[in-house]
Amino acid sequence: MNSKEIIRISLRECKDVLITLFFSALITYIFAGNYLFTNFSTAYKNLLYGFSIGYSLWKGNQFIGWLGNLYFPWKKNPKLTFTLNSIFSVIYTVLAIITINYLFLHFVFNINIFDNLGRWISQMVITFLISLVITTSFYLAYFFKWWRISAINEEKLKQEAIQLRYDALKSQVNPHFLFNSLSVLSSLVDTDTAKAKLFIQQFSNIYRYVLDQKDKELVPLDEEIRFIKSYINLHQMRHGESLKIHIDITDFSGFIIPLSLQTLLENCFKHNIISEEKPLTVKLWRENNFIVVQNNLQKRRIIQDSNGIGLETISKRYEYISQHPMEIDQDENYFTVKIPIVKSIS
């Protein structure tokens, strides 16, 4: 933290102290009236009491709001954040009011709170209601702000999901893909009937899976893995030993965005040379709560048709549904993408 940041924070806190002093003095005068100015000691003690109540409730609830947003961001689930913040704020406010009233009455005003318990309870209830109105107003303002943003983001998410499915389907009906697939099938029909049948089955599985994901935001990891194995088999039948793909995943728990792995593999195939002289090696493995897709880097000079938004679309969608972003890393030898695994569907 540099000196400018320290000065900025200090000035903000000084402003908050002055605001608290003003409003606590105003509220104290409303309740105490001219009695507040009986003497310096009375004014000092009552203003200190009002300031302690106001500042502790303001900063305490502000901290609860910050902590709530840290672990349960408003942009992820405004209803949940509003509910949790409200519950913890109520608990904190009640405890703070009781504690400060007891300490001030006992040690500053030398009053036994139990001598006139009903009066002090009434005063604490009024203080609680004032704090509740102010705190709830702030939380409601945040709630409606992020609820509106969440609704907009949800619509964007739907559009991006449609775009990703459209891109995946488009890649399957791409003339190059169809021509190459049918050429492979044609050669297999004459040479290996069993492989030809397997090819047709894998070909069918791909289209069925793409169409089945039209309404899904997340799919089980094992379903996506089974799908890409069919997708990989088609490409390996075409490229033979020029394409080496290794899947080392034993833990299939969790969920990922449908067609995300297929998009990453397609990205590998489109942007890299695949030949006997330069075989392409792609590895997939699980690393904690990420699926890693890595290929050796051997870029094509001329890239096949690509709209270039596949990775960007997946990345944006993960921003909405996961606390962990998608990671992309490239060096001289490898291109690596890590996509988060979501533990459960909320």
Image (tube, rainbow, N blue to C red):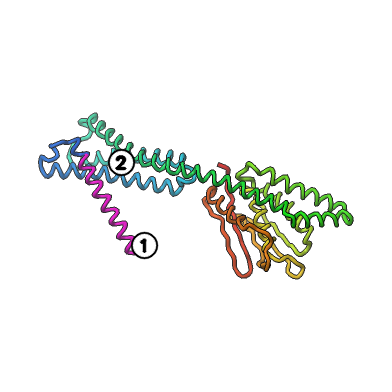
- Per the image, the residue denoted by label 2 is 96
Q: Is residue 94 visible?
A: no
Magenta-span inclusion, residue 23: yes
In the picture, the disc for residue 1 is 1
Q: Nearer the viewer, mark 1 or mark 2?
A: 1
Residue 137 position in % (x across, y down): 35, 39
Magenta range is 1-26
Query: In the rendering, at what x and y percent does residue 239 appear?
Result: 77, 61
On-image quarter of the C terminus = top right
Q: Is residue 198 left or right of residue 147?
A: right
Of all residues, the one furthest to the left in this rendering is 39
Q: CA distance from mark 1 to mark 2?
A: 31 Å
> Does residue 185 appear to the left or right of 106 in the view shown?
right
Q: Earlier in the sequence, mark 1 or mark 2?
A: 1
**Number of numbered discs on residues:** 2
Viewer-closest of 67 and 297: 297
Dot label at residue 302: none
Direction right: furthest residue: 190
Q: Quadrant of residue 345?
A: top right
